[in-house]
């Protein structure tokens, strides 16, 4: 026993000695200056390169504010942002002359990014410091809408015109437009505790990475004018664990994508999202719209969605399929935002619609489960299969509170709306209308249209307060045995 204790103590000290001797490279030793008027890009890059050259270690950003453009993270390097430190993206376009990358599609506009990595292994960004992208945006008036060309957004614009809502006022980015992090084709990626502020474009974009761990990060951009400012984009990645994050953005807070670049695309699969708080003027958690490859085996649990234009959202348009997704223990609060943002205050919206007639199918959504959900929404739950199938969907213990809209162009009609869904099960679900502040546009608690194999168990809901429509409405619907439901 004594020998065992001696061995254990010796091992403990050896481990801590090894950690203490881990190489640390202070960016100030390489010429970085804590001054947001002087670029420290070269100094930060020198520290990273020296660290990588010597086998890896920690590049330390001490307390202070540093001005930078793009730096490249190398294999086996942990960029550690100390408490009180911040890397500020330069606002001079000329500073990024040789530092732009394509994000998303091959024909996409090249953008600036603070931290870049390509084909690297064992890379980390840690610490409680900040990456401040210093976004600048301006308001403008878009041209009047002459024709509805896209059914996904067209209905919303058409409705805005009908009710006289302002759909022309928008915002756009003022160059340069840096994001914070773009890692492509990397393995064993760790991002922990950092704060990302006011990104002009996708704040954290991880493309084609394997073994990704994102924990405890905070992403913040303007909910008023933060166009294109997605929070965390997981693009064609596998083996991803996201936890304990707070994301509050103008555009989508957390988005899974499968973009196509240079005719290559990869699936999103084996992904978990846990214990996150998401806020967005668009979708809080979205799968799509870029959907060139499949999304499979995804679990989202113990999350809060607050003050979002859409809660849980799948928009499949490019031929990829969504399979085996579980949402459980989620609280949702959705509200209408300005007309130029995508969304209707939907608690949940799943849809399939081809982006182009050149593809054979938009893609299939199947094997999706919503389990233990409480949602307060200015619009309800919509599953709409337009160009391809939505099938094998389960709602278990889903409570939906319908709230009045805060906009003049009323969009909400039904609590739950299902269109072209095959094999739908609803167990212990409920719709509760706000009876103190009602909407005359409200119709049914549940509207099923072109639904095959419907199973309803202990699912309840009243007529909308205006009493014009039944609580349950069926149009071309069959039960689990194929018999019509009327």
Image (spheres, rainbow, N blue to C red):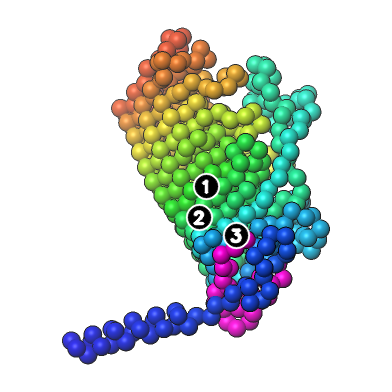
- Name the element at disc 1: strand
* Residue 282 appears in the figure: no
Looking at the image, residue 426 sits to the left or right of residue 123; the answer is left
Q: Which mark is residue 72?
A: none
The range drawn in magenta is 41-65
Looking at the image, residue 101 sits to the left or right of residue 235; the answer is right
Q: Residue furthest bottom?
A: 3
Evaluate if marks 2 and 3 touch, with contact meaning CB atoms under 8 Å apart: no
Name above or below for residue 166 compared with residue 294: above
> Label 2, label 3: how many angstroms apart (C-alpha)?
14 Å
> Label 1, label 3: how many angstroms apart (C-alpha)?
18 Å
Front residue of this view, candidates 361 and 7 = 7
Residue sitting at 56 percent across and 71 percent down? 60
Give the image quarter of residue 481. top left
Name above or below for residue 486 compared with residue 139: above
Evaluate if marks 1 and 2 touch, with contact meaning CB atoms under 8 Å apart: yes
| Magenta stretch: includes residue 85 | no
Q: Foreground mark, 1 or 3?
A: 3
Front residue of this view, candidates 188 and 340 = 340
Q: Position of residue 245 (x, y in %)?
A: 47, 51
Q: Earlier in the sequence, mark 2 or mark 3?
A: 3
Q: Which residue is mark 2?
A: 217
| Magenta stretch: includes residue 52 | yes
- Name the element at disc 3: strand
Q: Foreground mark, 2 or 3?
A: 3
Residue sitting at 68 percent across and 17 percent down? 164
Q: Which mark is residue 247?
A: 1
Q: Position of residue 128 (x, y in %)?
A: 51, 60
- Name the element at disc 2: loop
Instruction: For the N terminus, give its image quadrant.
Output: bottom left
Q: Which mark is residue 86?
A: 3
Q: Position of residue 410 (x, y in %)?
A: 57, 19
């Amino acid at each position: 026993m004594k020998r065992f204790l001696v061995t254990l103590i010796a091992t403990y000290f050896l481990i801590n000695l090894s950690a203490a001797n881990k190489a640390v490279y202070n960016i100030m030793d390489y010429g970085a200056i804590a001054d947001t008027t002087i670029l420290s890009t070269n100094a930060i890059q020198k520290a990273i390169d020296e660290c990588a050259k010597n086998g890896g270690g920690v590049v330390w950003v001490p307390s202070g504010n540093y001005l930078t453009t793009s730096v490249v993270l190398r294999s086996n390097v942990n960029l550690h942002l100390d408490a009180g430190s911040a890397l500020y993206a330069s606002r001079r376009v000329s500073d990024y002359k040789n530092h732009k990358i394509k994000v998303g599609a091959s024909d996409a506009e090249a953008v600036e990014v603070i931290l870049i990595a390509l084909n690297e292994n064992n890379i980390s960004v840690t610490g409680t410091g900040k990456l401040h992208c210093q976004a600048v945006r301006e308001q403008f008036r878009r041209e009047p809408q002459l024709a509805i060309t896209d059914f996904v957004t067209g209905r919303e614009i058409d409705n805005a015109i009908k009710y006289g809502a302002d759909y022309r006022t928008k915002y756009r980015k003022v160059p340069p437009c840096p994001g914070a992090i773009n890692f492509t084709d990397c393995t064993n990626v760790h991002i922990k505790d950092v704060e990302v502020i006011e990104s002009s474009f996708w704040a954290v974009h991880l493309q084609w990475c394997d073994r990704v761990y994102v924990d405890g990060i905070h992403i913040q951009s303007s909910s008023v004018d933060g166009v294109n400012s997605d929070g965390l984009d997981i693009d064609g990645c596998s083996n991803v664990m996201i936890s304990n994050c707070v994301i509050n953005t103008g555009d989508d807070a957390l988005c899974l994508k499968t973009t196509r670049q240079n005719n290559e695309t990869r699936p999103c699969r084996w992904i978990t999202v846990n214990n996150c708080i998401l806020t967005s003027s668009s979708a809080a958690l979205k799968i799509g719209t870029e959907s060139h490859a499949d999304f499979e085996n995804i679990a989202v649990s113990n999350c809060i969605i607050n003050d979002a234009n859409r809660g849980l959202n799948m928009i499949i348009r490019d031929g990829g399929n969504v399979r085996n997704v579980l949402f459980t223990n989620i609280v949702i609060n959705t509200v209408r935002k300005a007309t130029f943002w995508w969304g209707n205050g939907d608690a949940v919206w799943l849809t399939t619609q081809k982006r182009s007639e050149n593809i054979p199918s938009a893609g299939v959504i199947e094997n999706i489960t919503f389990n233990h959900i409480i949602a307060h929404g200015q619009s309800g739950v919509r599953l709409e299969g337009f160009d391809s199938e939505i099938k094998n969907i389960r709602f278990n213990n889903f409570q939906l509170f319908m709230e009045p809209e805060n906009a003049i162009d009323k969009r909400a009609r039904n609590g739950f709306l299902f269109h072209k869904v095959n094999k739908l099960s609803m167990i212990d679900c409920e719709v509760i209308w706000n009876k103190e502040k009602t909407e005359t546009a409200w119709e049914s608690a549940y509207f099923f249209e072109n639904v095959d194999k419907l199973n309803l168990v202990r699912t309840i809901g009243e007529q909308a307060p205006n009493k014009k429509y039944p609580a349950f409405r069926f149009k071309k619907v069959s039960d689990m045995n194929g018999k019509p439901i009327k």
